[in-house]
Amino acid sequence: MPTRPVPSRLPTYQLYGDAGTSGVPERLHVETISSRSRLHDWEIAPHRHEVLFQILYIASGQAEAQVDGRRQALGGPAAVLVPAAAAHGFRFEPGVQGWVVTVQEAHVRQLLASEPGLWAALGQRPQALGWGRAGPGCLRAQGLPNDVAARVAELADEHAGHARWRQAALDAALTRLLLALARALPPVAEGPGAVPAPDGHLARYRALVEARFRLQPSVASLADELGITPTQLNRICRAQLGRGALALLHARMALEAQRQLAYTTQSVKHIALDLGFADPGYFTRFFQRECGLSPTAWRRQAHR
């Protein structure tokens, strides 16, 4: 299979390959893996969705996922959870069986608002979950895949139908799927090392960081928007995540730099300017401190 050229920018789609990205995306879309991937020679090139959360469920067959620069071998049954803005691509074995569920991330948060621990488990980072053959880095799913498979099929049937009160039924089916996936995740250890339930201020802070990291806002200004002091914000971040508020902001900036270095041909200077650095040299020092390599060395390693 010929190597695809690296784009100058990381493509952003509502659904992969769709020409337009304007307008409000469909709240929920469900389709088979083959319906789109076979049109692209079973390869979905790296891209991202700004406001969409995706669940890819492989019932049978093999695939390789590439998410935020990391490659992951998958064998069905398996699932991949991709939060909004995460760079991701897939290469499928021809004839692979499964589904792709795409939903507005804000709607998922709304559905799970009464149980914030569910969103914390499912949506904070990309995750691969396997019941069958899977490479290193894939979480070992708990229990049998039947429950998740049944929930995906239920959602797909409801999405394809036109019964009365369809939207309410879709929300109920999606919630059952999310719950089944959360229960399949390995349990978080209890005791001193356990991760506490997410704090409302922390969730709002992370949303502000996601919206404004390119502007390099001060922690003080973000804390003020939350109605708390920088000291209180730092205390919350350290208690929940083990690092301060500024470290979270810097980590998000570094992640965006990694995505652009891995998936685009943009120059280091251009990436620096996009992330609010007027001096490329300062950006290089920032990136090396955060990631352990210079931007050029990191890009070279990512392309091996």
Image (tube, grey):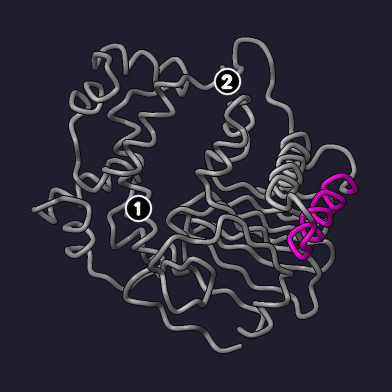
Q: Residues within 10 Å of mark 2 (few under 14, many from 20)?
A: some
Quadrant where the N terminus sits is: bottom right
Q: Is residue 86 above or below residue 199?
A: below
Residue 75: tell me if it is visible. Answer: no
Q: Main secondary structure of the magenta part?
A: helix
Residue under pointer 1: 256
Residue under pointer 2: 195
Residue located at (81% from left, 69% from top): 97
Residue located at (90% from left, 43% from top): 144
Residue 298, x across and y down, in percent:
36, 58
State left or right for residue 49 relative to residue 298: right
Q: Amino acid at mark 2?
A: Val
Please give the count of numbered marks on the rendered protein: 2
Residue stretch rendered in magenta on the structure: 146-163
Residue located at (85% from left, 52% from top): 149
Q: Closer to the camera, 101 or 173?
A: 173
State left or right for residue 152 relative to residue 254: right
Residue 294: tell me if it is visible. Answer: yes
Asked if residue 272 lies in the magenta stretch, the reply is no
Q: What is the quadrant of residue 257 in the picture? A: bottom left
Q: Residue furthest bottom?
A: 2
Residue 91, x across and y down, in percent:
64, 73
Residue 108, x across and y down, in percent:
58, 42
Q: Which mark is residue 54?
A: none
Asked if residue 152 lies in the magenta stretch, the reply is yes
Residue 139, x across and y down, in percent:
71, 43
Q: Closer to the camera, 301 or 59?
A: 59
Q: Separation of disc 1 and disc 2 at Cα?
A: 25 Å
Residue located at (87% from left, 44% from top): 147
State left or right for residue 106 relative to residue 142: left
Q: Amino acid at mark 1?
A: Glu
